[in-house]
Structure formats: C-alpha cells, structure tokens
Image (spheres, rainbow, N blue to C red):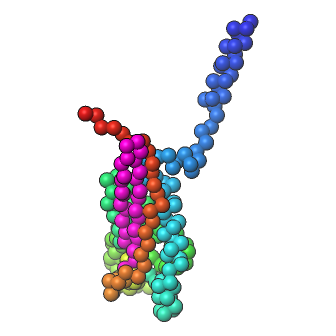
Amino acid sequence: MKKIASLFLAIFAASLVFAAPVKRTEDTKDLAENWNENDIKIVCNHIIDEVVDSRRIKNFARDNDRDPVVIIGRIENESPERIDTSIIEKKLENAIINSGVCEFIASRDQRALLAEELVYQSDHASADTAKEIDNQTGADFMLNGSVKTVVEVGKTQTQKTYHVVVQMIDLETHNVIFSTENDEINKLYKTTKKKI
C-alpha cells in the first residue's frame, strides 16, 4: 500500500513540474551572453529620450516653423556577432515618429516601390487622381549609427560591452546636429579556457 501511495505521489509531482508554465522575466533574458531583444529596448529607449530632449532638433522646429524631416541611413553592425540592426532602425523610427518630434521619409526599399507605383499611375490613373512624380518631401537629416563590442577577458570572467552610437547629420551642410552613445549593455560570463 505504501509503495502504491509513493508511486502516486511521484506521478502527481511530476505532472505538476511538466504542467507548470515557464515564467519568462526580463532578468531571465539578460542572462544571454549575446545581444537580445531586451537589450534593443534598453538602448532604443535611451536614444529616443535623447532625441526628444535635443536642443538642436527643437531649435530647428522653432526656426523653420515645422518639424525636421529625417531619413534612416544605416545602423552598421561593427561587432563580430550577428546583429540584425534593421530592428534597431525600425524601433527608433517608430518611436521618434510617435513622439511627434520628427517626420520620416520612406526607406530606400519603400521608395523604390513607390516610384514604380507613380510610374504606373502616370500611365494608367486618371489625371485627377494620379500623383506627381517629382513632388516628394526632401529630408533635412539622415540618421546613421553603429554597434560595436569591447571584450575584456579575465582569468575567470569575461565582460562584453556594447557601444551603440547614433547620429543625425544635416544633408545640406553635412554637420552633425545630434549624437548620442549608449554603453549600458554589459554581459558578464565565465571565461572559457582554451584547450592546448
């Protein structure tokens, strides 16, 4: 009887383990040794706050009586890791647009599709509804940046720091009107000993 009871308890305990949902927290994600989604959120939030508070961007809006128009250039991955920087570009674009501080021009790929549509309209749409080909808005600034890593290897631990730089450059003068750097993301993990 005791054996049957013990067996029943073991089966019941196992069912609880396998049935319990796995709780994913932000702290769990941070245990990853490489760049992850949580890191993107932290970095982008910092950069967006800097853009919104930028005195030069506010001065442009005041002097020109309109918000600056920005085009995304490229966030370059200069680290040895495989980092999809297009995710950073899109998150920055969406957040800055929603902040109301800047307007954005369509990306290169989007503009190519739009150009095809305009050519099609010029041949097939009515004169009243066809959009003009040479009537697009020119960008004032281009947003560029990079992601780099600095790795410090110790005897027992290795620390990896991500440096993310974002700049806005005036397309006419090529002056840098905004620049910020974020190095909040640090990864600490055990140093792997090389086999001789």
Q: Is residue 66 left or right of residue 135?
A: right
Within the image, what quadrant is residue 156 found in? top left
Q: Is residue 90 above or below residue 21?
A: below
Q: Determine the main secondary structure of the stretch shown in magenta.
A: strand
Q: Is residue 139 left or right of residue 6?
A: left
Q: Is residue 91 visible?
A: no
Q: Is residue 35 above or below residue 95?
A: above
Q: Residue furthest top?
A: 1
Q: Nearer the viewer, residue 78 or 188?
A: 188
Q: How many marks?
A: 0
**Image position, residue 76 (x, y; %):** 33, 64
Within the image, what quadrant is residue 171 found in? bottom left
**Image position, residue 29 (x, y; %):** 52, 48
The magenta segment is 144-169
Residue located 41% across and 51% down the image:
159
Residue located 42% across and 75% down the image:
179
**Image position, residue 39 (x, y; %):** 48, 56
Q: Is residue 24 left or right of residue 159?
A: right
Residue located 37% across and 71% down the image:
144
Q: Is residue 25 above or below residue 55?
A: above
Is 149 inside the magenta-drawn segment?
A: yes
Q: Nearer the viewer, residue 146 or 159?
A: 159
Q: Is residue 195 visible?
A: yes
Q: Quadrant of the N terminus?
A: top right
